[in-house]
């Protein structure tokens, strides 16, 4: 479980895109609710947080890259769910998504938070999407807000 940060969470001046995979919607919609709630709880304005539906988790990096290049957002939160199957596709997909999102963040110089669940079962995913293990969508949003705040503070120095 994630420990509480000492960085204040203030999203009042942040414009954030939430990219949500439509695959495993019963999980990703709960992640989306958690992310939006965390944004609003941190003082964000509803009209400054845009949710964009993406076909699947695999497509998150290319859409994140396009959104980053638009210059309209301060941070991007990506939400998806990859479940282990009978093959190793989940590991291949998970690594590729992580690399793509990290490269976008490094090239852009702003946060691209990864709230992509990689679970063994759908039950594990549901537990992490507002169930007994919290909401990883909210955690991804909080990480994006904290990182954006840190970067703003460093830019001001």
Image (cartoon, helix red, strand yellow):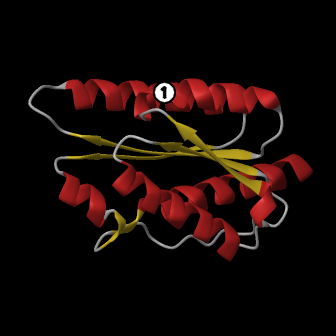
Percent x, y for residue 44? 76, 67
Q: Is residue 81 left or right of residue 156?
A: left
Horizontal placement of 19 versus 27: left or right?
A: right
For this orientation, the residue located farthest to the left is: 86
Which residue corresponds to the image point at 53% horizontal and 28% vertical from the top-left?
Answer: 61
Q: Quadrant of the N terminus?
A: bottom left
Instruction: Determine which quarter of the picture holds residue 3.
Output: bottom left
The residue lying toward the viewer, choosing from 103 and 6, is 103
User: For residue 105, what is the image quadrant?
Assistant: top right
Q: Residues within 10 Å of mark 1 (few under 14, many from 20)?
A: some
Is 31 positioned to the left or the right of 64 in the image? left
Residue 18 visible, this orientation: yes
**Which one is nearer the viewer's eye here, 138 or 49?**
49
Asked which quadrant contains residue 82, the reply is top left
Could you tell me residue 108's position as x and y percent? Answer: 72, 30
The residue beneath circle 1 is: 59
Image location (x, y in percent) of residue 107: 68, 25
Is 44 drawn above or below residue 23 in the view shown?
A: below
Q: Is residue 113 above or below residue 14?
A: above
SS of the residue under disc 1: helix
Residue located 69% across and 71% down the image: 40
The image position of residue 94, as x and y in percent, is 34, 32
In the rendered view, does 46 fall on the left or right side of 53? right
Camera sees residue 8: no
Image point 62% across, 72% down: which residue? 6
Across the whole image, how many numbered discs are drawn on residues? 1
Q: Nearer the viewer, residue 111 or 25?
A: 25
The residue depicted at 18 percent of the width and 38 percent of the height is 84
């Amino acid at each position: 479980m994630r420990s509480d940060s000492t960085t204040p969470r203030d999203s009042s001046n942040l414009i954030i895109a939430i990219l949500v995979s439509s695959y495993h919607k019963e999980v990703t919609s709960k992640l989306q609710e958690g992310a939006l709630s965390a944004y609003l709880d941190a003082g964000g304005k509803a009209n400054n947080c845009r949710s964009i539906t993406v076909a699947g988790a695999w497509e998150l990096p290319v859409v994140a890259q396009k959104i980053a290049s638009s210059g309209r957002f301060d941070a991007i939160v990506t939400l998806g769910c990859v479940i282990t199957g009978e093959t190793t596709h989940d590991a291949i997909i998970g690594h590729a998504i992580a690399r793509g999102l990290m490269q976008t963040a490094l090239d852009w110089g702003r946060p691209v938070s990864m709230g992509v669940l990689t679970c063994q079962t759908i039950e594990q995913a549901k537990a992490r999407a507002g169930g007994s293990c919290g909401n990883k969508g909210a955690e991804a949003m909080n990480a994006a807000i904290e990182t954006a705040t840190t970067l703003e503070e460093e830019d001001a120095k």
